[in-house]
Image (spheres, helix red, strand yellow):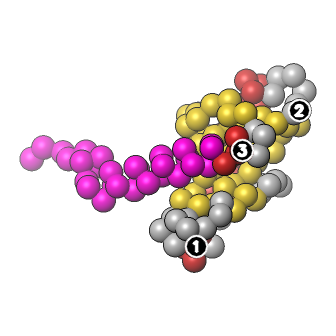
């Protein structure tokens, strides 16, 4: 019996598309706030960073979570997920903050009809 790829599942494809759309909207929102997007969907052995953004001497590694309702956003991020983002960010600091910039991990939560919720310094070990 042939294996079916996970991406062949319509629900999985829809979730992936919604996630990418949320990342695009979060990038635009950050740009409007004066951030420059350095990179998107950066993969490391520790995990993936959705957005890498810079404003002044600050580099933010940003996790974006998009959900169907604002109520679902309250459960979109937890310490385990943030720890994975932090581990990936740690590997990327030499690439994006080699000039001595300050670094932090942010989260942007998005739902239709809601203003993006930007949580600055979401991870502090």
Q: Earlier in the sequence, mark 3 or mark 1?
A: 3
The x and y percentages for residue 80 are 64, 59
Residue in the picture at 90% in, 27% down: 100
Real-space Cα separation, disc 2 to disc 1, in angstroms: 32 Å
Give the left or right position of residue 39, taking residue 86 as reference.
left
Picture residue at 24% right of the left edge, 48% below the top: 8
Residue that label 2 marks: 57
- Return the residue at label 1: 70
Query: Are the residues tagged 2 and 1 within 8 Å (C-beta)?
Result: no
Q: Quadrant of residue 92?
A: top right
- The answer to whether any part of residue 76 appears in the image is no
Whether residue 17 sits left or right of residue 64 in the image: it is left
Quick one: SS at disc 1?
helix
On the image, the x and y values in percent for residue 76 come to 58, 66
Q: Which residue is mark 3?
A: 32
Let me know if residue 43 appears in the view.
Answer: yes
Q: CA distance from mark 3 to mark 1?
A: 22 Å
Q: Local crowd at mark 2 within 10 Å, few (<14), some, or many (≥20)?
A: few
Region in magenta: 1-28
Q: Quadrant of the C terminus?
A: bottom right
| Magenta span dominant secondary structure | helix
Q: Residue at x 66, y 48 (%)?
A: 29
Q: Residue furthest bottom?
A: 71
């Amino acid at each position: 019996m042939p294996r079916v790829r996970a991406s062949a599942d319509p629900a999985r494809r829809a979730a992936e598309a919604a996630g990418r759309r949320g990342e695009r909207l979060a990038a635009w929102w950050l740009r409007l706030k004066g951030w420059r997007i350095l990179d998107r969907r950066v993969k490391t052995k520790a995990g993936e960073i959705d957005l890498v953004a810079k404003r002044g001497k600050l580099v933010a590694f940003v996790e974006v979570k998009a959900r169907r309702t604002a109520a679902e956003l309250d459960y979109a991020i937890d310490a385990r997920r943030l720890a994975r983002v932090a581990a990936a960010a740690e590997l990327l600091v030499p690439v994006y903050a080699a000039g001595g910039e300050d670094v932090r991990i942010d989260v942007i939560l998005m739902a239709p009809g809601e203003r993006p919720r930007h949580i600055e310094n979401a991870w502090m070990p």
